[in-house]
Image: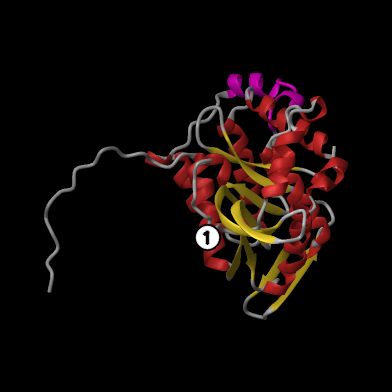
Amino acid sequence: MSQKSNRKLRRTGVEHFGIQRKIVANMTTESWETIPHAGANYEPDVTEFWNLFQSLRKEPEWSGITINTLMLYVITQGLKACPALNGHISFRRKSANGRVETISDIDISIPMALPIGGMMTINIHNCERMRLRELSAYIGDVRRRMEKTDFNEAMFSAALENTVRLLAKGKIDVIARRLIGNTVGKGKMPRLNRGEKKAYLAIPESERLTKRDIEQGTITVSNFGSVYRASYVTPLMLEIIPPQICAIAIGGMTERPGVAAGSDGVKAMSIRKYMSFCIMFDHRALDYEDTVHFMEYLDGVFAHPEVMLEWL
């Protein structure tokens, strides 16, 4: 029988959770505790798609369009072709009663890097209504408004909304513990004083992020490939944020040998480009076959990338 060591470990540092990490910890814990995750890794050949994009971005009308925005647009079109992935679930374990609401508005929650460091999930509203250039402008405006945003204050407003949701569910004990944890001791959160908050709220909402920008979307899309561009890592798992029923992670682009048909129709081995996607879904709401139309749409885009000429 092994004995517990009395050796005191040497710490290199201690950092208590801030509001950002508390929100992430609460949401991801709820996700893995309550949602039966299922997933698929999808790795399409994007060689022709990438080559055409590289050519188009030299044109003035494609200036400022990034691969990240382009992929977000592709996913939006995929969700329009496969609306089953874009929805919310309500489920009662004790009675086994539940329902899934498919939503026509495609509000994509995407983690974005903050000017102060760290990440925040931003809700890109009504992606289904935007053309590619409009989507690019929307994301650019979000980044502009980030510069004048007090992120602690913005995240507090999001946390308050989550508290109201818990109150509606009668979870008074959870609310009480959170209030104590956020207002006293080492977990106390810094807040603006009355004068500072008044000055901050005087900033027009058109110049800063608001609760609407960080509220819950209809689906989450995380672009791991944009964080580590040289990565050959394929995202394998990510959490689905309730009540959403699907989350998608985009991996980096890799090169490896593959078989493809040339212009003469003859197949040959060559170096091809592949992009990885991790598609996670709530198995209470969806089955594997429900993801097929999404992947079929993307297959069509990558096989016939000239369709992007119609997207601006």
Magenta-drawn segment: 194-209
Residue 307 position, x and y percent, is 84, 47
Q: Amino acid at mark 1?
A: Leu
Determine whether, in the image, residue 269 is placed left or right of residue 301.
left
Determine the main secondary structure of the stretch shown in magenta: helix
Residue 19 position, x and y percent, is 51, 40
- Residue in view at x 83 percent, y 60 percent: 81
Does the segment drawn in magenta span residue 198? Answer: yes
- Residue in view at x 44 percent, y 38 percent: 188
Residue 222 position, x and y percent, is 61, 48
Which residue is identified by label 1? 236
Q: Which of 26/67 is in front?
A: 67
Residue 63 position, x and y percent, is 75, 27
Residue 87 showing in the rendered view = no
Residue 59 showing in the rendered view = yes
Q: Which of 146/97 is in front?
A: 146
